[in-house]
Amino acid sequence: MSALEAGTACGHSPDTRNLRSGVSRVKDLVAIASDWMWNWTPFILVVTYVAVSICLYLVVTESIIAVLWFICMTTNFYIAGSTVVEAFVGLGPIRESRKAVQKAQDKNWVFPTPDEKLLVLDLIIVAYLPNEQDIIMDRALYLLEKLMYPRDKIRINVVYNTPRPIEPLETDLWNLAAKHSNLRVIKVPGSTSKADNLNYFFTLNTGANVIAVYDCDHYPHPYGPRWAIERMMSNKKIDIVQGRCVIFNTHESWLSKMIAVEFDKIYAVSHPGRAAMWGFGLFTGSNGYWRAPLLREMKMDGSMLTEDIDSALRAVSRNCKTVHDSNVVSYELAPVTWQSFWKQRLRWTQGWTQASIKHIIMTWNKPIHGQRGFVQRFGLFSLLFIREISYYLTSQFTLLVVAIVILRFPDSGISLAHLVFFTYPVSAWFFIISIVCLILTLWITNLVKSEFVSRWMIIQFSIFYPFYLTLFAVIGLYGHARQIIRYSSWNPTARS
């Protein structure tokens, strides 16, 4: 029998094989087109938003433009004003932290609580191994050797997932655990996320009183855990202690320098100030210490893109007490390339949008435990609603300026400045007050800047701040567009 006859006899004629091959190619093309649409739809939505906005501003009346201008300037003024007020209010916690350090120094670093009475601490470093294989061993050794906390009271837990074996690293980690009784290495089966890793660990009965959560790129300050536990033992009502995160790789790029200033502004000024001003603090995903029973009960919601923000807001919904302690310091890596920065901030922005939609109900509902006053409700409204719409207001202001420049193209730099900042009489006051608020906020940031941030870096940050706000508005819009199409791909931040 010929080959053709044999193939035909088996039911695989040339025409059938060609048909199947054609169907397979069509399916591949459909899949490629679908992936392309999935990845580029947010971009198309943002570009459409920009184009339509500019076109509308070119045809609407002058009175409508004046009203929109006033709304944008008023909202930006509110954001700038609340930021500087938070900064001034945050000076109180900063002074208390410095007093605590001075007191510890005066006593030769003898803390109030005897070592034998300290709480048992589970310190977790969470890792996605393919992404962090170059740093995980270094971090594990650092935690074992440098932390100033009694060895019998702390356990270091390396909790990781990996889609494929990575050798000899995994064997080296297990061998390290065999040499150190206070090191536990856990490979989480079937895990695809940080939430999976943490939730698996929460099922283990370790007997710890407190659980600290760290991303793999962190170097906790040697006394960081001690400060956190002392804070918890000083007030049994404290459920969570959130520390200060400091960027240490400022030497690697200009971008990492600007992120370092941003982190100093956020962690040393804004977070403590907001907690004091509005009556609630937030766990930020890393360098956070939880009462173990609370965290084991709450767990992490794996359906959320930023499960840490969701857990922080769920803690707020239960009226848990979260404090920000500037002495609980940890050093971490910032993205050094624009691509990694873009991916990281897009994930954060979309995650915040998810969490805001889910938890905006806290601005009017009754808490699970206790009461929620007007001040806290307004603070939550500002965080979950005004912050989200600020992306549109900032972008609309920028697009409005573009439209005005097109309509009244300036003939000099002075004319351009006047057009951008002083088109309407009230604009001058809003602009001047906003600049004063920015200067005051960064002046306070300069008072508490980390050892990796210089005054010149803060000056550069101030100069580029308007561009920074515009960039974050674009990232915010992109994050909203991703949420609209339910984009769910997880892009880990590159570590090295």
Image (cartoon, grey):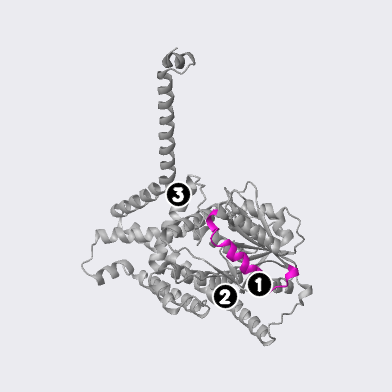
Q: Residue at x 52, y 50 (%)?
A: 490
Residue 31 lies, in percent from the top left, at 44, 36
- The residue under label 1 is which amino acid type? Leu
Q: Earlier in the sequence, mark 1 or mark 2?
A: 2
- The residue under label 3 is which amino acid type? Ala
Residue 216 is drawn in which quadrant? bottom right
Residue at the far bottom: name it.
106
Q: Is 381 placed left or right of 102 in the picture?
A: left
Asked which secondary structure carries label 1, the reply is loop
- Reading the image, the residue beneath label 2 is 90
Q: Is 461 placed left or right of 164 in the picture?
A: left
Q: Which residues are magenta?
A: 130-153
- Reading the image, the residue beneath label 3 is 481
Which residue occupies the foreground of this view, 464 or 431?
464
Residue 150 in magenta? Answer: yes
Residue 70 lies, in percent from the top left, at 39, 63
Quadrant in the picture for the N terminus: top left
Identify the mark at residue 147; answer none if there is no mark: 1
The residue carrying pointer 2 sits among few (fewer than 14), some (14 to 19) or many (20 or more) residues within 10 Å by Cα, namely many
